[in-house]
């Protein structure tokens, strides 16, 4: 594939960002769709090559959290960990850190 200067991918080359957020629409299909799972792994590999952290949006189950952690996703957000919270509560949660590595601990609490 050749990228033209005005193509969508070329437009993001000049942007300065350090986190790549992975949309829920992909997350919800990775356990049932091999193409989605391969795409997720490719996104994670690309992010790692670009030295970007990855965040999975809309993680709803322990199985999703475990899969994402195994695929190398850095962090997750979603109902698996918490309901919607106020800004102050979100700040508290974020200050404590909540990477996907904590998924197993959270899953055992919810069992």
Image (tube, rainbow, N blue to C red):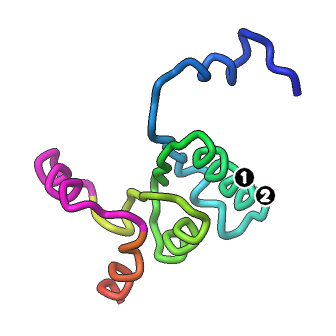
Mark number displayed over residue 84: none
Q: What percent of the width, then of the height, locates residue 85?
A: 20, 54
Q: Is residue 84 left or right of residue 61?
A: left
Is the Cβ of the residue at disc 1 closer than 8 Å to that at disc 2?
yes
From this viewpoint, which residue is outermost toward the right?
1
Question: Considering only vertical position in the picture, is 96 above or below 9?
Answer: below
Q: Nearer the viewer, residue 47 or 80?
A: 47
Question: Considering only vertical position in the picture, is 6 above or below 36?
Answer: above
Give me the residue at 54% from left, 46% from top: 23
Give me the residue at 45% from left, 37% from top: 18
Give me the residue at 42% from left, 58% from top: 75
Residue topped by disc 2: 35
Q: Is residue 93 left or right of residue 50?
A: left
Q: What percent of the width, then of the height, locates residue 27?
A: 57, 57
Q: Badge 2, how many Cα within 10 Å: few under 14, some, many 20+?
A: few
Q: Quadrant of residue 36?
A: bottom right
Q: What percent of the width, then of the height, locates residue 33?
A: 74, 63
Label 1's element? Answer: helix
Mark number displayed over residue 39: 1
Label 2's element? Answer: helix
From this viewpoint, which residue is outermost toward the left?
88
- Does the magenta-highlighted stretch encompass residue 98? yes
Numbered range of the magenta stretch: 84-100
- Does the magenta-highlighted stretch encompass residue 104? no
Question: Considering only vertical position in the picture, is 42 above or below 70?
Answer: above
Please identify the quadrant where the C terminus is shown. bottom left
Q: What percent of the width, then of the height, locates residue 97?
A: 26, 60
Q: Nearer the viewer, residue 106 or 72?
A: 72
Q: Is residue 12 left or right of residue 1?
A: left
């Amino acid at each position: 594939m050749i990228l033209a200067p005005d193509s969508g991918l070329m437009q993001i080359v000049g942007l300065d960002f350090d986190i790549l957020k992975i949309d829920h629409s992909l997350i919800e299909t990775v356990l049932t769709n091999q193409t989605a799972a391969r795409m997720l792994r490719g996104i994670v590999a690309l992010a790692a090559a670009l030295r970007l952290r990855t965040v999975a949006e809309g993680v709803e189950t322990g199985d999703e959290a475990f899969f994402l952690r195994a695929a190398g996703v850095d962090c997750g957000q979603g109902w698996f960990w918490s309901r919607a919270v106020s800004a102050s509560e979100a700040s508290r949660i974020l200050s404590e850190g909540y990477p996907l590595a904590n998924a197993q601990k959270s899953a055992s609490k919810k069992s």
